[in-house]
Image (tube, grey):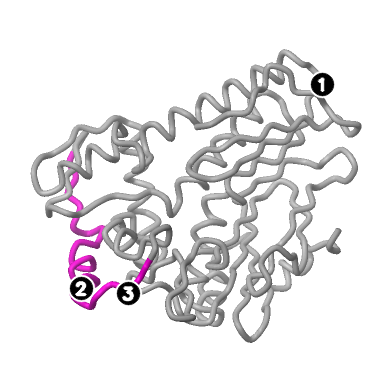
Amino acid sequence: MNQSSHSQIQADTRGVRRVEFRALGTPCAIQFRLEDENKSLQFLNDALGWLSRFEAKFSRFRSDSLVSQINREAGKNWVRVDAEMSEMLDTAERLYRLTEAILDPTMLPMLQVWDWKKLHTQLPSDAEISHAKSLVGWDKVERKTGKVMLPIAGMGLDFGGFGKEFAVDQLVQIARQFGIKDALIDLGRDVYGLGGNGLHPFWHVGLEDGINPGNCWGGVAVSDFALCTSGDYARRFEHQGKRYGHIIDPRTGWPVANGMRAASVCAPSCLQAGIYSTAIFVMGRKDGLAFASCAPGLDASAQDDCGIERTSGFVKRQVQVA
């Protein structure tokens, strides 16, 4: 994790202190209001320290992480796991069941086939996609107390589908432990807002337009809830004039191509907001919003090529674009 220097974090005229850094492969920021300078630095030390340890254990991009060790032993050996990894595996299974296999932590082979960061002179072949699909499926994962095993060589875990959201919720808990009433935790645009920004009793968070990236179609007054957006407008590649996003539909093995551009969800926790925004994006506007409507305390919007549909609760949470 790349941290900006925070040996001294000055508060602005609203009393807001802000630190920016990179973690989990994305730009991040923490804003909060706390008068005590030393307590503020201790909060940042604890929050960023926790995040650094989390990334060191659960990032598949680090060869020394526990996730990478599990992936290397696929088809070979059982790997011992600690209580934190067991909790993540339990969370992964719960989300897999909840989303009816839309959110599958064993999607790594498909993500590698469709790696949006690579230059694609040609699309993956049907054989490559079929082989990747054969390696995917949470039900294949074998577990017993204190151990886990991926039984087929080439399988791999990737917690990217919910890792940032899980981390946001943990940082919110750390903020509360320090008695912080006003904070905005933002890990790669997965956000949770506590209280307000010193000017308003909320934090104003923009909603990026999935059709016109870089512009906002609206904003949300975030206070004591999370807001997550899933879309293919930022992480994608183009081939022969057609764009292919980073969100893969595990049912087809192909990037989502249902006309969706973005899905945003407000929920009591960032984990819940993130998994439902992803599910809506993959399922499509009609089925996705119907699925989300079954969750209490959740409001959503879905943008596709035909326009934007919002739940009544989502409309009530919105503010004018700044």
Q: Which residue is pictured at 75% across the width and 69% down the height?
A: 217
Q: Which mark is residue 130?
A: 2
- Amino acid bearing label 2: Ser
Residue extending farthest bottom: 306
Q: Which residue is pictured at 89% across the width and 34% down the height?
A: 14
Badge 3 element = loop
- Amino acid bearing label 3: Leu
Q: CA distance from mark 2 to mark 1?
A: 57 Å
Badge 1 element = loop
Structural crowding at the residue carrying mark 1, measured as other residues with C-alpha within 10 Å and reported as few (<14), some (14–19) or many (≥20): few
274 in relation to 183, above or below:
below
Badge 2 element = helix
Disc 3, disc 2: CB below 8 Å? no
Structural crowding at the residue carrying mark 2, measured as other residues with C-alpha within 10 Å and reported as few (<14), some (14–19) or many (≥20): some
- Where does label 1 land, which residue? 35
Give the image location of residue 196, x and y in percent.
81, 42
Magenta stretch encompasses residue 133: yes
Q: CA distance from mark 3 to mark 2?
A: 13 Å
Q: Nearer the viewer, mark 1 or mark 3?
A: 3
Direction from residue 124 to residue 176 in the image, left or right: right
The stretch of residues the image draws in magenta is 120-144
